[in-house]
Amino acid sequence: MKKQLCLALAFGVSTFLSQVPAYSAQTKPIAQTAQPKLIGSDSNGGKFDLKNYAGKTVLVSFYGAACTVCERDLKLMREFYRDNAAKKFVLVGVNIDKTKSDFETYAKIVALSTPKNQQFPLLWRGNLSSLEGFGTITTGPVHFVINSKGDLLLRRDGTFKGEDWDNLWESLSQ
């Protein structure tokens, strides 16, 4: 019975994965006219400006609070952030929920349930005064890696892939 269950699960996962669109990650800087801009206020009401992180590798993740893929990715990203913050790595979450109250509820849950060393700036799309250089984002997750020179190295629509983690590691050593 266990073998049949494992086979059924494996078939289900492979069927699901075959239906997920493939997204090509780019490891060279993505053509862009200017440095990405992200300015607004964070979940604590503090001012946020992406340019304050110049010289660091930044992972910007656009997510929805009720998105299970986003939740899984953010858990892994929080752990990576915790382990690499001393290596000039910054993680920024941009919530794309429609209402501010959904974002505020999510931010409170994160503040209460996440260890301090895994907390990173959370912004709500509605509180942004400037969002440039990221293209169109309608659903999450969408992840961007910006190197220490401000070049946009990667855009990943959907879950962060194994090679994305490798590219992120590589960007930390530049």
Image (cartoon, rainbow, N blue to C red):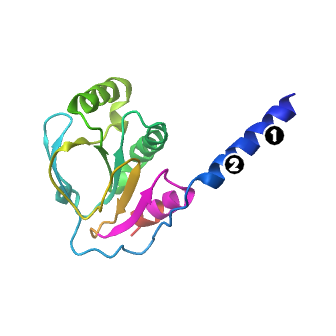
Q: Quadrant of the N terminus?
A: top right
Query: Magenta stretch?
Result: 151-168
Please identify the quadrant where the C terminus is shown: bottom left
Comes first in the chain, label 1 or label 2? 1
- Picture coordinates of residue 154, whole percent (x, y): 40, 65
Q: Which residue is mark 1?
A: 7
When the figure is inspected, residue 135 is found, relative to residue 118, above or below; the finding is: below
Q: How many marks?
A: 2
Residue drawn at (26%, 38%) of the image: 98
Q: Amino acid at mark 2?
A: Thr
Instruction: Indicate the position of residue 105 as horizontal and vertical percent values.
Output: 28, 25
Instruction: State the residue in front, 75 or 61.
Output: 61
Position of residue 31 relative to residue 153, above or below, is below
Dot 2: within a 10 Å radius of its alpha carbon, few (fewer than 14), some, or many (20 or more) residues? few
Is 108 colored magenta in this rendering?
A: no
> Is label 1 or label 2 in front?
2
Q: Give the secondary structure at mark 1.
A: helix
Q: Nearer the viewer, residue 96 or 117?
A: 96
The label on residue 15 is 2
